[in-house]
Amino acid sequence: MSLEDQSHPLHSIDRVVVDRLLAAQDPSDADLVDAARLLTRYESFPGAGDLREDLVRILGLWRLDRDSLQARTRAIWAQGFRPGQPAAAEGVGSGFDTTGDATT
């Protein structure tokens, strides 16, 4: 096996993600983050050309280039994005009243 034919251990898992991204017409924050991380993972990997080609295709479908994707994902992370967790809602807490008004 040549280096260009090398198989990545996460190829089958990442293939599922890439196929999902190909179907995303209006990408969510999680979609953008997934695309950016997979582009980074496979950009210099000697193999998995099918994934690299599809990731480039995804950027075209979303009308993004690599730099704009990176800028958007940096902003997403800066806003508190955490994979697998819903967006944080304002006002979420224990409900404990800290105003000191105990008349109610």
Image (tube, helix red, strand yellow):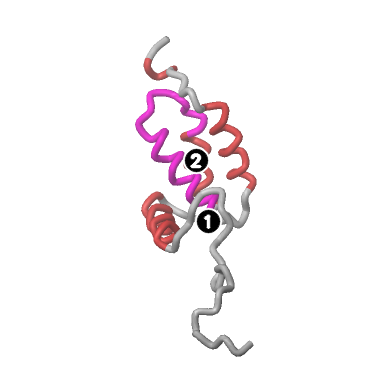
Left or right of 53: which side holds 21? right
Q: What stretch is highlighted in magenta?
A: 30-51
Of all residues shown, which one is farthest toward the top? 1
Left or right of 97: which side holds 66? left
Identify which residue is drawn at 41% across, 35% down. 41
Q: Locate the N terminus and report the quarter of the image it occupies.
A: top left
**In the displayed structure, would residue 54 be above or below residue 61?**
above
Q: Locate the C terminus and report the quarter of the image it occupies.
A: bottom right
Q: Name the residue under label 2.
A: 55
Q: Which amino acid does label 1 sit on?
A: Asp
- Which picture quadrant has residue 96? bottom right
Q: Do the residues labelled 2 and 1 touch (CB within 8 Å)?
A: no
Q: What element carries label 2?
A: helix
For label 1, the crowd category at 10 Å Cα-Cα, with few meaning under 14, some 14 to 19 and many 20 or more, is some
Residue 7 rendering spot, x and y as whole percentages: 47, 20
Identify which residue is drawn at 47% across, 42% down. 56
Residue 99 rendering spot, x and y as whole percentages: 50, 84
Residue 57 badge:
none
Identify which residue is drawn at 56% across, 53% down. 85
- Which picture quadrant has residue 42? top left
Residue 84 rendering spot, x and y as whole percentages: 56, 48
Q: Mark 1 points at which residue?
A: 29
Residue 77 rendering spot, x and y as whole percentages: 42, 57
Q: Earlier in the sequence, mark 2 or mark 1?
A: 1
Question: Magenta region, mostly helix, strand or loop?
Answer: helix
Which residue is nearer to you in this view: 74 or 49?
74
Q: What element carries label 1?
A: helix
Q: What residue type is labelled 2?
A: Leu
Q: Is residue 40 a member of the stretch shown in magenta?
A: yes
The CA span between labels 2 and 1 is 16 Å
